[in-house]
Amino acid sequence: MSLTPEIKLELLRKMLRARLFEEKIVAVYAAQDMKTPVHLYLGQEAVAAGVSQHLNADDYMFSTHRNHGHALCKGADMKPLAAELYGRAAGCAKGKGGSMHFVDVSKGCLGTSAIVGGSIPLAAGAALAIKQKGQAGRLAVTYFGDGASDEGVLQETLNFAALHRLPVLFACENNFYATNSPQKARHAEGLICKRAEAFGIPGVLVDGNDAEAVYGAAGKAVEHIRAGQGPYFLEFRTYRWKGHVGPDCDWEQGCRPKEEYFEWVKRCPVESYINKLTADGVLKGTALAQLKAGIADEIAEAWAFAKAAPYPAAEELFTDVY
Ligand SMILES: Cc1ncc(C[n+]2csc(CCOP(=O)(O)OP(=O)(O)O)c2C)c(N)n1
Ligand SMILES: [Mg+2]
């Protein structure tokens, strides 16, 4: 997979957009005017950036409770996302969904689910629709965690997708934890991607903290899917920096070993890529500062928009809710 300087800088821009958006959430969360739990994606940004680099706006994307990075890297407009965090009517889910329900249909972000594993079959459904409509070359991607891989619905969906050769990419982000339960306490076999092979689906393990490794593996997978060869499964090994939910870390409470946490923080996907691009001469002069300043402006505008937006009207209480 050839990587031009433009693509490298775009990978970095995507990661930084996800990173700075969530750093803003961390900075303001204690004020308690953001009435939503937040499952932060900090530390995992290389996955969404590297996969999204191969996606078009009309490809479908389904995500999880930890969805901010997925939506932003797919190109979602930041303003309705910020408004959703503040429960405003201008939010992407009209202020009724919160952080776990980021959508942007115009960018193919069709939905997320707080039900662990819930969006996996939705992606297969979208892929089936693509197939039935004869929209060759289009695909659906579903992001899900190692915890979701424990749900029976994954195995059912893998079988269905393989049987019908559906254009769907299974993107499993193995951050080694389902809430506070470590993978080694749950899985007899550590390689989740091996399960895909039982259904005749290629299953590949990828370093999820290396944006270029993600980009390369996702490129092969997407090429395979767009060529009509059926589904593909990628397992990305990565690590979340914050606790399962909320802006605090959780190693202090003994939820994870401190040494493990700091080992992974040393492998920051954003910092290591900045260092690589600087050493390679791709990132020069004030380029990084300009990139960050542009994203900071976008965040400031999104927050101003969100906080000025009205709450849903009382008579809207039961609209779109079931
Ligand atoms: C069906 C279902 N079971 C349990 C939960 C509670 N729950 C929310 S997130 C989560 C862990 C998910 O772990 P993983 O899929 O690895 O995603 P991560 O949080 O690591 O991104 C659990 C058990 C839920 N929301 N839905
Ligand atoms: Mg997990």
Image: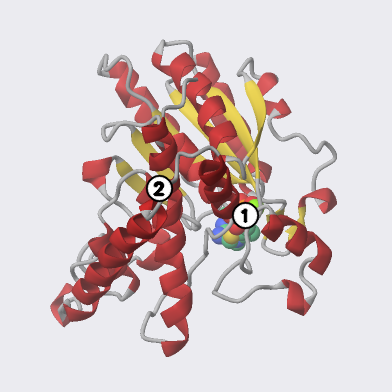
Q: Nearer the viewer, residue 273 or 59?
A: 273
Q: In terms of image quarters, where does ligand 1 lie?
A: bottom right
Please state if 256 lies on the left or on the right of 114 as rendered: right
Q: Is mark 2 within 8 Å of ligand 1?
A: no
Residue visible at 47% across and 44% down? Answer: 48
Q: Is residue 289 visible?
A: yes
Q: CA distance from mark 1 to mark 2?
A: 15 Å
Q: Amino acid at mark 1?
A: Cys
Marks 1,2: beta carbons within 8 A: no
Q: Position of residue 36 (x, y in %)?
A: 42, 75
- Residue behind mark 1: 268
Residue visible at 75% across and 78% down? Answer: 252
Q: Secondary structure at mark 2?
A: helix
Count of number-bearing discs: 2
- Above or below, 226 against 51 in this view is above
Q: Position of residue 248 (x, y in %)?
A: 60, 76
Q: Position of residue 268 (x, y in %)?
A: 62, 54
Extreme residue in the front direction: 285
- Residue behind mark 2: 14
Residue visible at 54% across and 26% down? Answer: 216
Q: Nearer the viewer, residue 96 or 219?
A: 219
Instruction: Mark 1: give few (<14), some (14-19) or many (20+) Cα within 10 Å.
Output: many
Please state if 319 lies on the left or on the right of 97 as rendered: left
Q: Amino acid at mark 2?
A: Lys
Please state if 102 lies on the left or on the right of 215 as rendered: left
Residue visible at 24% across and 63% down? Answer: 79
